[in-house]
Each structure stands twice: as structure tokens, then as C-alpha cells.
Amino acid sequence: MWEYTDKVKEHFLNPRNVGELEGANAVGEVGSLACGDALKLFLKVGDDGRIEDATFQTFGCASAIASSSALTELVKGKTLDEALKLTNRDIAEYLGGLPKEKMHCSVMGQEALEAAIKNYRGEAVDAHEHHEGEIVCKCFGVTDETILKVIRENGLKTVEEVTFHTKAGGGCGDCIPRLQELLAEARGEKGVCSVSKVAPLPEGLTNMQRMLRVQDVMDNEIRPMLQKDGGDIQLVDIDRTRVVVALRGRCTNCPSSLLTVKEVVEKTLREKVDPEITVEERS
Ligand code: FES
């Protein structure tokens, strides 16, 4: 289970400034439901260029909700230029820190803020393609500019850290060599572009890759299988190769639930994601 600070828990359970904002004159939208997280930020900017009010709507985990809530508190009263200086680290620090695997939630908040300010200033922003630069990670639509910015602002050193902050590299893994190039570029090692100079790919899956793949297989293969028989399943936790689930619908209290967990869920995840995976039903 993720270790959340008290402030993250508090902002998750009692999020500030939720919903559409009446009279908003700036909107920033980032992420997509397909990628698992989405955030829409509303700002009301006064004539003096200060942010008078801010609200949000989000689809995501506890960290996404807490980060969005923190963001709205942080930007209120700031001028647009002051707000633009906020980094994802400011959002994470405001919350007393985020689990490293969840830092991408703070990045999403910072991106939504940038998108909203661009929107206010009349700069073209597409809801899901507002990023500048070239797409590096096709699985999550992350560009080289975003990755470089996040590497520099957070002092990232490894591909896994880049994945935790941006999700890039957490899907098929095809972009990992390019992520290594961008890490080298951020270190000032210009010209480290040929594959021969790139460090070898890490063996096996990173935690983030495993987590995202488990979620994907669960949503697209296992759940539809169980739903055909009137059942359902909920992913409760993933800790490396240990996956905890809760059975729902007709699967709840079914005498053969252990069989379902082992023969359907565990077997499928072992085949499709990682042969080391073990699945347990939440007691
Ligand atoms: S292209 Fe980046 S993980 Fe698939």
C-alpha cells in the first residue's frame, strides 16, 4: 500500500475547491481517462491579473485528488506569472510529499495550470495535446519537452524516476532508450544519441510498468471475463509482484472464489504481465 502523509489523506478525504467554477475565465485540461488520470482546472483571473479563485474536477487516485486540491489552494491570490513559477515539487511539498510512484499526479497539476494560463492568454491549447515538443512515449502521449523539464526540475537520474513522474516508459517500454537519451541530455551529455552509447535496457519490468500493465489487463481482459458471469473485480493494491484484489457481484462469497483468483486472475496476470505475480483476495 502507498504511504501517504496526513496532509495527502486530509486533502483526499476533504478536497478543497471541487467542481466547475462559475465565472471562470481560464480552463486547463490535461490527461485522459484512457491514461487513468484526467484533470480539469478552472481559474477566475481578476482585472489585476491575480487568480481570484480556482476549482478542479479530476478523475484519478487519492494522490491525483490531493494534488489537484493542493494546486487550487496554492494558486489563489497569485499573479499569472507567479503561478507559472510553481513546479510540481511545490505541489508535492505542500502535501508533505507524495509516494515516489505517484509524483506524476503533481506533474499533472502543474501541466493543468500551464494549460489554463495559456487558455487565458489566448494561446491555442488542445485538451489532450497541449504539450509542446515531440511525442516520446506513445503509450501515454508524453513529449520530449515535458520529460526534459521534469527531469531538470526534479533532478531525476533514472528511467524509473522518469516513469514515476511522467508515466513515460510505464507501458510497452519502447520509449525507454529515448528516455535514457533525454536523461543524458539533461546531464549535459550532448550528442549521446546513438543507441550504442545508451545504457542497456533494465532487465524485467519496473514497478510502474508492472503496475500499469496489471491495471490494463485487469480492466480489459479479466473484468470483462468475470462480468459475463455477473461478477466483477476491484484492484485493491499492488506491491511489486503481489497483487491484492476484491471480488464483487456474483463473485462475492462464491464458494469457488479461490479458484477464480488463482486460475483466472493470477494465471492471466502471470501470462500477460509477469510470471512472478501472486494474487490474493482481500480478507
Ligand atoms: S511508448 Fe512509452 S511506454 Fe510505450
Image (tube, rainbow, N blue to C red):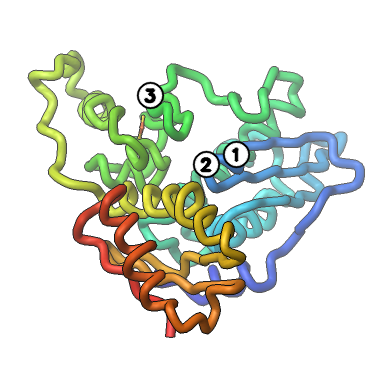
Label located before the other in sequence (2 or 3): 2
Work out whether residue 282 or residue 29 is closer to the camera in this orientation and state it: 282
Q: Secondary structure at mark 1?
A: strand
Which percent across, then down, holds residue 4?
Answer: 45, 71
Q: Residue at x 36, y 54 (%)?
A: 211
In this picture, residue 266 sits left or right of residue 203: right
Q: Are marks 3 and 1 in contact (CB under 8 Å)?
A: no
Say if 220 sits above or below 65 in the image: above
Q: Amino acid at mark 3?
A: Val
Determine whether the beta carbon of the residue marked 3 sits less than 8 angstroms from the nearest atom of ligand 1: yes
What distance separates the C-alpha of mark 2 from that of mark 3? 15 Å
Q: For the residue labelled by badge 2, is the local secondary structure a helix, a strand or a loop?
A: helix
Viewer-nearest of labels 3 and 1? 1
**Label 1 belongs to which residue?**
32
As drawn, is 267 to the left or to the right of 275?
Answer: right
Q: Closer to the camera, 138 or 162? A: 138
- Report, in whole angstroms, how far the alpha carbon at label 3 lies from the one at label 1: 17 Å
Along the viewing direction, whichever of 72 and 272 lies nearer the viewer = 272
Above or below, 62 relative to 10:
above
Location of residue 269 by image quarter? bottom left
Query: Which residue is rendered at x = 78% and y = 35% of the image?
Result: 26
Q: Which residue is mark 2?
A: 35
Q: Amino acid at mark 1?
A: Ser
Residue at horizontal 61 percent and vertical 72 percent from the top = 249
Q: Earlier in the sequence, mark 3 or mark 1?
A: 1
Is label 3 in a helix, a strand or a loop?
Answer: strand
Query: Where is residue 78 shown, x and y percent of the image?
Result: 70, 45
Callout 2: CB less than 8 Å from ligand 1: no
Question: Which of these two is toward me, 8 or 263?
Answer: 263
* For the residues bearing labels 2 and 1, Cβ distance under 8 angstroms: yes
The residue beneath circle 3 is 136
For the N terminus, the quadrant is bottom left
